[in-house]
Amino acid sequence: MDVNKLEHAEIQTENESDKLLVEKVFFHEQEHVFRWWNDLTADEQRNLLGQLRLIDFNLLQDLIGKHVEGNKPTSLKTVTLEPPDIIPVPQNDSQKARATEAKEIGENAIMAGKVAVVTVAGGLGTRLGANRPKGMLPISPIMGKSIFQLYAERIQAIVNKYDTVIPWYIMTSLNNDEMTRNFFEENRFFSLNPDNVSFFTQGVLPVIDLHGRLLMDSKSSIVTSPNGHGGTLLALKEKNVLSDMNERGVKHIFYHQVDNVLIKIADPVYLGYHIREGAKMSPKVVQKTDPEEKVGIVGIRDGHLDTIEYSELSKKERYARNPDGTLKFGMGSPAIYLLDVDFVEKINESHFALPYHKAVKKVPCIDENGCKTEPSENNAVKFEMFIFDALKHAGKSIIMEVVREDEFSPVKNAAGDNSPDTAKQSMINMFGRWLREAGIKIPTDEAGNVTGTIEISPLYALNAEELKEKIGQPDGVLAGKKIVFTGELNLQ
């Protein structure tokens, strides 16, 4: 079929609804998707029409006009950039007292059932050499528990400690939803109550070529891509998660991404500060390791709280220092947020709509002959929303600094930095610090890493304080016996 001569009438469909859909595709000049229509089986034709029906063509045309045909920048030039006021890691008695007060407020909210957890887990671990959900990755240092199991045990430990309910909502993608659900069912939800664990899929957008035409990955299928972590806020509404939260009396959402193995789920201190200040969306931050670390930073851009991407910072801004020698713009974002349910509902109102950003990528597709091709150069545009774009609408936020070594160790690469190996070492080192605080001697090498292997289940102790209570300070005694670390310790 010659795409240049396609007419509506050549695309035979079964009903009036399909006919109107075809007309819409032609109206938006995307008729090339029907190039192989007469070669498709009836099921393949239905699949293609089903995909097309899910596309918001008005939105797509608007994105093409802004980001492809107009070639406009995705964001305006920053006029002013200032560091934000933060709640620092407690150092003195006054700061520690405020943290204790905040913790009590957060614990009361947890006990009252006002807190839910949202885990963004839509990706596959392809960069890790595995074509399965990243949350299924075995990661704990001795037992080899999956990331999902670690999170489940942390949630169960909080439920046990506060005699409460913490609903857990896991955002998957069309690519990994079934695998994720099956994994939880096979593992009996890691002893969590299945009624309190829900899965919902992230929205997708079509991928276009550099000229604004829909890319095809087969003769009957369009290339799609997740709509970015900002799409979480849309999905919470569209998948009726917000409705479920309201029915349960949930007021606060603890949001995090699946790959951070040190995440302090539903941190009561963080919750308490957020609630006490009447905040609507609040980020945690960690000190950047160095000026060139490629993470976004939290700052006040043109009068509004925002996350500024590494690429948006000038060299001068990246290297700017405070009088005490710390980086002026050094508060990196580990993508941990607290959001109020009513705020997410407002974000879903049109006047709070998050902007889309474009990403130019190499995307496999089929060529004009219908043959699969792996491009050697960028050939496609994906559109994504970023959750941090909601910050400027929050009105009130708190920014809480935490210690990286205690709360941030992502798994993104197969080897080197931010890999399974570094994540396991991060956990071992954290457990080592807990044990030292409880009076146990733990050796380290010249780099400060524990020489040996340690694993402490969240169900045994959620933090250093709980471990102290179990072991006994300062004698390091457990169950009547003094603990001596001999290279491996497994507390379950």
Image (tube, helix red, strand yellow):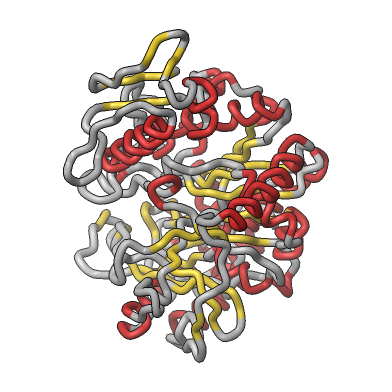
Quarter in which the C terminus is drawn: top left
Residue 204 in sight in this render: no
* Quarter of the image where one finds residue 131: top left
Quarter in which the N terminus is drawn: bottom left
Residue 375 in sight in this render: yes
Q: Is residue 449 above or below residue 337?
A: above
Q: Which residue sits at x=37%, y=54%?
A: 217
Total tally of numbered discs in the picture: 0
Please name whichever residue, 421 or 441, is drawn nearer the observer in this view of the structure: 441
Q: Is residue 372 above or below residue 173?
A: below
Horizontal side, residue 224 vs residue 392: left or right: left
Please name whichever residue, 298 or 48, is drawn nearer the observer in this view of the structure: 298
Horizontal side, residue 371 vs residue 144: left or right: left
* Quarter of the image where one finds residue 375: bottom left
Q: Is residue 272 above or below residue 378?
A: above
* Quarter of the image where one finds residue 140: top left
Horizontal side, residue 184 vs residue 159: left or right: left
Q: Which residue sits at x=30%, y=49%?
A: 418
Q: Is residue 121 above or below residue 371?
A: above
Please name whichever residue, 190 or 162, is drawn nearer the observer in this view of the structure: 162
Q: Residue furthest left?
A: 446
Q: Residue furthest top?
A: 480
| Coordinates of residue 344 in the picture (x, y in percent) | 71, 59
Please name whichever residue, 95 or 397, is drawn nearer the observer in this view of the structure: 95
Q: Which residue sits at x=40%, y=57%?
A: 36
Q: Which residue sits at x=59%, y=44%?
A: 267
| Coordinates of residue 225 in the picture (x, y in percent) | 45, 57
| Coordinates of residue 461 in the picture (x, y in percent) | 51, 26
| Coordinates of residue 128 in the picture (x, y in percent) | 28, 42
